Amino acid sequence: MLMLSTVLSMSAQMVDPVHFTSQLKELANGEAEIIFTGKIDAGWHVYSTNLVGGPIPATFNKRKMEGVETIGKLKARGNEQQKFDKLFDMEVRYFEGIATFVQKIKFTKEKYLIDCYLEYGACNDEMCMPPSSVEFKKSGTANIKQEKEEGKKEEKKEKEEEESKDTTIAVVSQPHPQPSASLWQPVTKELQNFSDTPQENSLWYIFFAGLLGGFLALLTPCVWPIIPMTVSFFLKRNKERSKAIREAFTYGLSIIVIYVFLGLLVTLLFGANALNAMSTNAWFNIFFALLLIVFAASFFGAFELTLPSSWSNKIDEKSESTTGLLSIFLMAFTLVLVSFSCTGPIIGFLLVAVSTQGSILGPTLGMLGFSIGLAIPFAIFALFPSLLKSAPKSGGWMNTIKVVLGFIELAFALKFLSVADLAYGWRLLDREVFLSLWIALFGLMGAYLMGWIRFPHDDAEHRTNVPQFFLGLISFAFTIYMIPGLWGAPLKAISAFTPPMYTQDYKIIQTTVVEPKFKDFEQGMAYAKEQGKPVIIDFTGFGCVNCRKMEAAVWTDQEVARRLNDDYVLISLYVDDKTPLAEPMEVEVAGQKRTLYTVGDKWSHLQATKFGANTQPFYVLLDTDGKPIAPSRSYNEDIQEYIDWLDQGLSNLKQ
């Protein structure tokens, strides 16, 4: 199950999760509203207005407005949600599903011209978009009433007071040189060449992880006892060799079809992106943790957890009363039902692990591998029922497996609770607390395997055998390995499971601080050429939550920090930097001309055109000529994978 919880990072891609429309709605008294309405994809959210010092807020920006003046500030409408964000140390407000922003205006002349845009920020649980904009341009003739001079002065005074605290931003432009053409050459094909093989490996990895999960499921205390029932069922069937082969094949295929259908059903009902969002949802993680705790208590002997006997009995009776393919399929369905209390957690881990693939292919391949791993042994027993004589009978060894599985499920329950704890900022499971509980769990598991403690369903003469001794030794060694983590040791082998390092209060081992050498692409590349060092480009944002998570969880590791500080030139490019460019840049995107006004616009355009990506965090390794030397990386807190990726870039550069 450790393998099932590890997922490769997502490959670079262009995403478009928010779709805005804009319109002008005329009101009475020469007033009107500019309305921006956005439909937001599942798993994403758009931040609201008036967020100071945090994520990218929604703002109204004027380029040219003639015969029109704004009234008040940009207003947000709809189901606005609010929560405390620990990384920003502030309350943030955002929208999911639909977001509406309205800017009220007043016509001052009959002929008017409006050239403006809405800027907004969007994030999901793994990445953030750069500041995105929605253009609105309109000109025409307005129906306005003449007002008294006194009234105009009063209204102007009120407008100036409102604009003093307004979110409206007027863009200021000054001269600035165009960027180096050679450094801005697209390298999307080169990045794809790097990522082709890893993507294939990723899909193969998912399949083989599922296959391993299927084989492991065979040894669980819910599945093993079904073997005699399977043998008994097929011993009653016709003994013809050809028919036995056909029925064994049908039985195995039925198991595969049921499990693959289950994976497809969950994915189609919730969607691959929704599965990804669910995997980081606090309440889902709490529910899954409680489910694992209940299973663990059952395996420790507190109670027997089984599905209602009437369900499996009726299906079992039906399978014996019918003939042909239907009875075999019902027998396979009985296996799935009866074994679910043990296979459920494995399936859950599998579906959550592959959910970040962002497509239906990952869950399908994972469930295919799992079902094949589970179906092969049962198909063999169905084909050769006499093999049961050589299979070990359920007994004391099965109780040992139950207890060990209970300890492991408790450890994983803490992982799921940790996700919820981080999401809500409760700080109940900080890193040292989490490690203390894991140390206690795996220490107790070692004591059980050594025969020092017993559970209610263990035999009175429960003693340690040779396999249990070696497993206990491994458990104790793992326990000792984790102890230095209480004082800040990185524990790279389990860094994907433990809470981030920034949650630890007491650290004797201090980590090295990583600071970018440059925040300008051209300047950083020029320096790298002088020094003869490769470059790591960090596309980030001041309002990017997951960028801060990567910096806190990965860049604080000593080995990562050493490589970033000594072996590379780190260039951090903030795509939400509002600093005006010295001169607006005219660029062409998909055949349409676009004007870049801010430093953030420039870096966002660089990321999209040169690297074919538009989400943050996004990391890419380049040589001094701006060519990639390794595949790109996105949000993934696996420290060892990040180190391997940095080393891969250095190795490729030498070659």
Image (tube, rainbow, N blue to C red):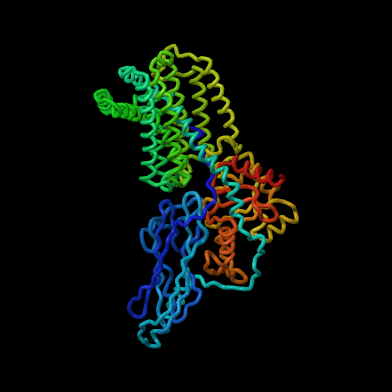
* Residue 443 appears in the picture as rendered: yes
Q: Is residue 540 left or right of residue 95?
A: right
Above or below: residue 426 compared with residue 372: below
Total numbered labels: 0
Image quadrant in which you'd find residue 365: top left
Above or below: residue 564 compared with residue 343: below
Q: Nearer the viewer, residue 597 or 404?
A: 597
Q: Is residue 294 left or right of residue 436?
A: left
Q: Nearer the viewer, residue 169 or 443?
A: 169
Q: Residue at x 54, y 65 (%)?
A: 589
> Where residue 497 sits in the image (x, y, percent)?
52, 38
Q: Is residue 323 left or right of residue 125?
A: left
> Where residue 305 sits in the image (x, y, percent)?
34, 27
Can you name the residue that lies furthest to the top here?
461
* Residue 308 appears in the picture as rendered: no
Q: Residue at x 50, y 15 (%)?
A: 464
Above or below: residue 46 compared with residue 513: below
Quarter of the C terminus within the rendering: top right
Q: Residue at x 46, y 27 (%)?
A: 216
Above or below: residue 284 compared with residue 229: below
> Where residue 33 sits in the image (x, y, percent)?
38, 72
> Where residue 17 sits in the image (x, y, percent)?
45, 56
